[in-house]
Amino acid sequence: AAAASPRTVRLASGFDMPLVGLGTWKSMDGVVGDAVKAAIRCGYRHIDCAHCYDNEAEIGAALKELFDSGEIRRDELFVVSKLWNTKHEQRDVERALRHTLAQLQLEYLDLYLVHWPMAFARTEGVAENFPRRADGSGPMWDFEAPRADGSPGDVPLEETWRGMEAAVRAGLTRSIGASNFNQAQLAAIDYVQVSTKSGIPIAVNQVESHPLLPQTSLLDFCRARKIVVTAYSPLGSPDNVRARTDSDPSLLGDAGIAAIGASYGKSAAQVLVRFHTQRGVVAIPKSKTPAYMAANLDTFDLELSEAHMAELEAMGAAKPFRYGPNGGAKGHPRFPWPEYFDSPEEAAARAAREAAREAD
């Protein structure tokens, strides 16, 4: 067989990030610790976490067990976490990161991401991830209540990014990045870090991606700015029971993807992972089954043909599909892709506004 392709990608910060990692979103209590241990034992060196997944303490206990036994060293792992939407004020970023580090029992992260571009109302503690309005509805947005000092509650992305930069300077994380940001939002941060001349670049933008949502234009935009893209739900989020409906397309059950895999002696899941890494995109499939974990990692000897890559990328070209159940956040002006969740009436109104803008 041909020599295996690179297993890591170099970030703008100078650090190397493994191209395949273990996702931990929706991993249940009592399962995620064992999953992390199994993944590391079968060769994973990249674990993707987040405060709002509510499982960082269990992951931290698993990591400590492996460090204490000598099975792995901290410097061999690439650990990612994310700043939650209630902690976007600059003064809250470092404290939120220190809480995550305490949960994970680590002294530093390899990568810390702003989980979403839109902020919720600020909460004082770490337990309340979805603040509610007086009538019980939610989440409550940042701009709906003033800050503690009486100034407007809206938190600009630039302010949050200054907090992220400070976390790097404090030695709490090696690299920083974004998650669920659209091109304009990345450009806003990019401008900040360029305009301050001392800014720290966006290393990564983590977004949902798979053949039904190939993210081609976003990927081109990021490549031009040396931002690495990470794909979440790379297998099509087959376990997201809360959001899935029977009518949702199944990527793992797709005959075309299975046929591509069969021609190389690989599974549909392996094709879906390789679809990303062959484009230089990081993939973070989630699994709790060691055999599947190992198979997802055993994809670097697979070289998909140009025709097969084009076939996969074309699947979502006409009508992209998102598995992420995020339309409820469309009410925030910084929601990254409101057009995807538009009703037919909203879509027509948006098209009319854009046409009028072009006519000006």
Image (cartoon, grey):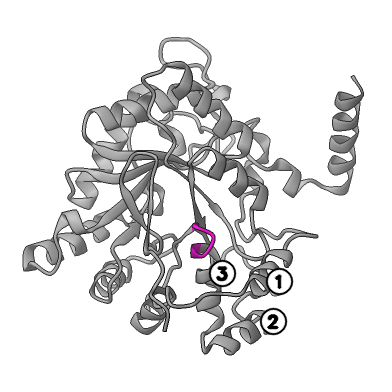
Residue 38, placed above or below residue 345: below
On the image, the x and y values in percent for residue 302 come to 48, 77
Please say whether residue 279 is one of the residues in the magenta stretch.
Answer: yes
- Where, quadrant-wise, is the C terminus in this rendering? top right
Query: Mark 3 sits on what residue?
Result: 241
Q: CA distance from mark 3 to mark 1?
A: 28 Å
Query: Mark 2 sits on what residue?
Result: 256
Task: Report whether 282 appears left or right of 49.
Answer: right
Q: Circle 2: is it few (<14), some (14-19), or many (20+) Cα within 10 Å? A: some
Amino acid type, mark 1 = Glu
Count of marks placed on residues: 3
Please say whether residue 81 is one of the residues in the magenta stretch.
Answer: no
Which marked residue is nearer to the observer: mark 3 or mark 1? Answer: 1
Task: Report whether 155 appears left or right of 81.
Answer: right
On the image, the x and y values in percent for residue 278 come to 51, 65
Q: Earlier in the sequence, mark 3 or mark 2?
A: 3
Secondary structure under badge 3?
Answer: loop
Residue 17: quarter of image = bottom left
Q: Earlier in the sequence, mark 3 or mark 1?
A: 3
